[in-house]
Image (cartoon, rainbow, N blue to C red):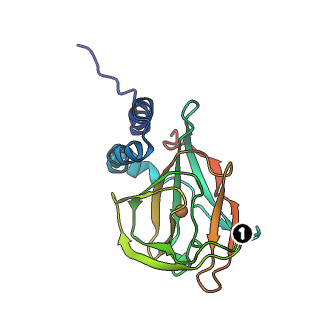
Amino acid sequence: MAVEIKTQNALDRFVTKARDLFASEPDLEERWAKLSPIMAELLADSEVIEASTTWPNTVVDETRVHGRAENLLFYEDPDYGFVVSGLKKLPERSGNTTRVHDHGRIWTLYGVLDGRERMERYERTDDRSKPDYAEIRRSVNTVVGPGEIDLVKPFEIHTEVTIGEATIALIIRSEKPGEANQGRYNTETFAYSESHGPRQTPVEMFPRT
Ligand SMILES: [Fe+2]
């Protein structure tokens, strides 16, 4: 009797489907909308959820000028450039917010794997006449939990705020951050600046035991 050997994990399956989609759907709005249910399968996979307990915690390196957050880098596509990353935040950072920012030209799907956090969106309210100034107003303030996916389009202003729970998230981006600048927004002074995106540290999604 033939023994079925499982050779593909959930990340392999995600990559295969994502590559098919990138090859067949040139419209970026359509492509990223269609990628969301494919990411949902990755978020719901029991092996991914189990493996995530072994991933290292990610940190914000406050010694850097802008405090670049660290991401776990699980996959970078050699042809289409999209990347699969992870974030694992400790509960003691409660109240600390990832600074309000955009992702520049990058398209992003942010999906929660474990825990809950607050997701805030902002809209720009000034006339964009000054290069280092951006008035913004909070337009969305909602709590998200496991399985929920947020599509962040280029230059959309947002932040995630920890609410006393450890959280683990997966992030799909159209390209590796660092190649492109992202905007930083001060919600009190409305100062605007640009800096590199989160530092990416290569890690195995499924550590070998
Ligand atoms: Fe972000």
- Neighbourhood count class around disc 1 (C-alpha, 10 Å): few under 14, some 14–19, many 20 upward: some
Q: Is residue 30 left or right of residue 84?
A: left
Residue at 52% x, 42% y is 207
| Extreme-top residue of the structure | 1
| Extreme-bottom residue of the structure | 188
Residue 1 figure quarter: top left
Residue 110 figure quarter: bottom left
Asked whether 180 or 42 is in front, the reply is 180
Q: Amino acid at mark 1?
A: His
Element class at badge 1: loop
Percent of width and height locating residue 72: 58, 51
Residue 112 figure quarter: bottom left
Residue receiving disc 1: 66
Relative to 124, say whether 205 is above or below.
above
Relative to 162, say whether 169 is above or below.
above
Residue at 29% x, 22% y is 4
Visible residue check, residue 163: no
Residue at 48% x, 56% y is 153
